[in-house]
Amino acid sequence: MTWFNSTNANVTNGSNIIKINDNQSVANIRASDALVLGAFAPVEISKAYVTTHGTFIELIKPWPNATQSQVPCVVLPTSGDFNTAVLALNNASKMVNDNYKTMIDWQTTMGSVQFSDLDGNTQTVKTLRQLQSEIDAVNPYPWAMRKAEFEARRQQNLNQYVASGFVHFGKHLGSANTVNEGLWERTTESNVLRLGASYSNAGASVTDEPVLHMAGVIVHLSQLCNTDEAFNAVKLPAAEAGLRTYDSATGLSVTHSSPDVAFASETSTNTVVTERSDMYGFELFLRELNDTDPFVYKHGIIQSQSSNINGVATIADTVRPATYFAWFEGDETSTGKGVNWIQANEAQRVAIASDPKNNLYFDDSTGKFYQWCVRGRSFAGYDNGDWLFINSTEATALSQQNANRTRVGVQGFGNAPQDTASGARFFASTNFSDHNARPYKGLYTAKTDSNVLGADCFFIVCNTVNRLNRGAYHPSFNPMGSAYVWNGSTTIAWHNAYFKLTPKQHAFTDIASNTGAISSGSSGRPDERLHDAIYISGPGGVCRDLRYRAKALTDIALTHVDLQVKTGQYRGLQTCPFTQIFASVNDVPSGFTIINQDTPTAIVAQTTMGPSVSGNIPHIDVFGPPAKILQCPDLKNGWYGHWVPHVLQDNTATTLHLSRPATNILSGILTNDSGATWQTWSPALDSINNTTYLSASMTSSQCIYLVYYHTQASMTIHANNQRATSSIQPRSVFVTDSCEPHSGRDLLYSLTNSVGTSTTAHNKAIDYAITSIPLDPSSSITHPPISHTAPSNNSKGVKALPYFVVRNNQVFINFAYTQLIHNGSNWGDNNTVHMIDGQQTQLDANGQEVLCGTAQLVEPLGWIN
């Protein structure tokens, strides 16, 4: 069939030539086609052609009508064309009618069918369902991600990130107490921390929920033990009640029937656990979905409380026991909700499998579905004190002590953690080659061997938490206690008791019920803390924050931490100083350092003890004669804090200088009868001079005074000069003598143990650009002369050169520092920073002895390539 349409044609009456003016193609016009020009009757065409003069249509007969100019015309096919088309349609209809049932069978049945043509020939073809079945046999579940694609994505992630860690920390609730980015708490929630937030949130994270990278797998932590989107609950074990002992010789932990039995079981190696440090993190493992383990979970989080997965309703997983979902031993409240994959229909499966966040794939080689899953796990410290092996770069296992039983056992898809008393069923560090054949930076890994339970299982440490206990508070016998004392008829504080909490077990037997817990709202501590509340820092609070970024640290990130240190915003980390008075030098145990000898019968010595604390921490300064303290039952066994040498005179007002920079004073008590009775007083803080005042009526040479106050945990520890491994050249020297926390006061104290007291405005936190950096890392670096004026209040100062060093792919800040003392004319400085190991003393240009050395920030900042 041929068609033609022109909008501009000319014809003259009596002529058989039609002129086409718009040059429309006439290639399809055939003889006997009909031309319709304007509104006139059709005329028969002889032929159509194109010359150098234009496009023309020739008619069989001359045009009988009036001459026409620039009128439209069309060419219509003849009836023969229509007849041909009708015949073709009839044949097609016959073909359809003759093969109609066969077409239905082809669409709906299995096997093959036969189609017939017009000549009666047949053709056998496979049905649509048969073809789909054969395709599915080779490539089932085409909507599912294949293992090869999933592993390719893992490798891309491993190439993109320098270590396993946090891609995003998540938001934190702006109205709550924030530990660090994405980590927060409410002190009204018992034994719980929070990660992420999805409403009324704050923080710089680009995602509401925390996002983890672990061994190439990306995990979106959402609704873990929580129904709110992006909120995650971290559950911790309950506080100690003086019932459990730990034997360092055997590694055995035993829970006894009563505190009396527990304390009676103590030996030189077996002690009651009262000063515990907890740890939590996340375990990643691979599961096969099958009839005995059929559930899938949102984002692979087995403790998820989400009501649906991509619109598919969830139910509680009753196939697995509570121990499978437990955060810690004894936790029976964390059973997760998921979807039974075996019972789910295809539409539900497609919805879940189409979301890559669910970490689900199909393995063609086994014909099975698999899901990478995450379990939150927390651990009560076995013993008193810190977790000693918690850095994944160390050549050991993840454990609190050297004992095998304190190692963290692999659980994976098992219903309970593995016993680590013997064998290799524990998480090993990247450098523990005997038990870790697949090291990933930032992760502890189970050994790859024939033990399927240990294959493809990883653990990342997030935080440690310093825990209070349920006993009565006492500064010497139970400094981690939280309750009041019960004296038989009344709830009282330790210093008001008419009897003494000796021995220590009385702090767990003579306690006032319903005190020390959130439910009571009543604390026997000076800082009013409760044993089941989790705080952002200090006793009972978050200590180490080991949530490092998965991406390599940038110069901007490093500079940001350096600024936090200088402005007093860095959390710090330390074990607490413990002071005790001894009758003679021979009585001082190993590990103690003698700090003062007044008389031969009263030796003041100090050590560090207990689990580490971070951030804003309480501290006790004791003032008074050491001989009197030695006679005081409440203090003679020592206390967490300092003894401050200060000669007191009867009825003479005096100013007490606190040993550490104080942020606020909590309370004060005193005794004038060696602790037979105590009375409270309310010391006021002079925040500039870091002192408190004693009026003449309160002052006695025989009194013992206790001042409770908050201070910042130490930021640095002594270190060796490591400028040879510096990743970035140092740029400036920081100088301060200020009394203000945001102007370097805490760094000054951390480096030199001097408390800044100057208020001179010009002296606040000045950076001096360095003028020369010798190639030899041990050589001194120079800077311009210090322009600081004389300090007020005779304050000492410090100059510190920060530089970044790398150890085991982790970045630290080192400080090369020198103490500054003003002699009334100048600071006695020689414009050089000495690169030396540890801490030493030297004479400045004025002949005054000053401290100098190298210190390192207490925690690494993160990972680098």
Image (cartoon, rainbow, N blue to C red):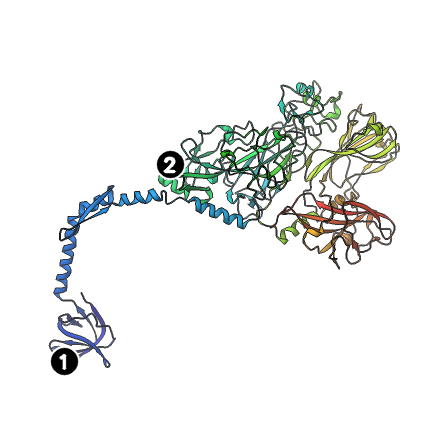
Q: Above or below — where is 463 with respect to 418?
A: below
Q: Is residue 343 left or right of residue 786?
A: left
The residue nearer to you, when weighing 814 against 249, is 249
Residue type marked 1 = Asn
Determine which residue is flagged by label 2: 344
Q: Is residue 28 left or right of residue 149?
A: left
- Whole-percent x, y for residue 224 in the image: 51, 37
- Whole-percent x, y for residue 699 in the image: 85, 32
Q: Is residue 442 left or right of residue 264?
A: left
| Circle 1 SS class | loop
- Whole-percent x, y for residue 81 in the image: 14, 64
- Whole-percent x, y for residue 756 in the image: 78, 46
Quadrant housing the N terminus = bottom left
Which of the 4 image quadrants contains residue 135? Answer: top left
Residue type marked 2 = Ala
Residue 13 numbered mark, or none: 1
Q: Going 55% across and 49% down the picture, which residue do you hit?
A: 161
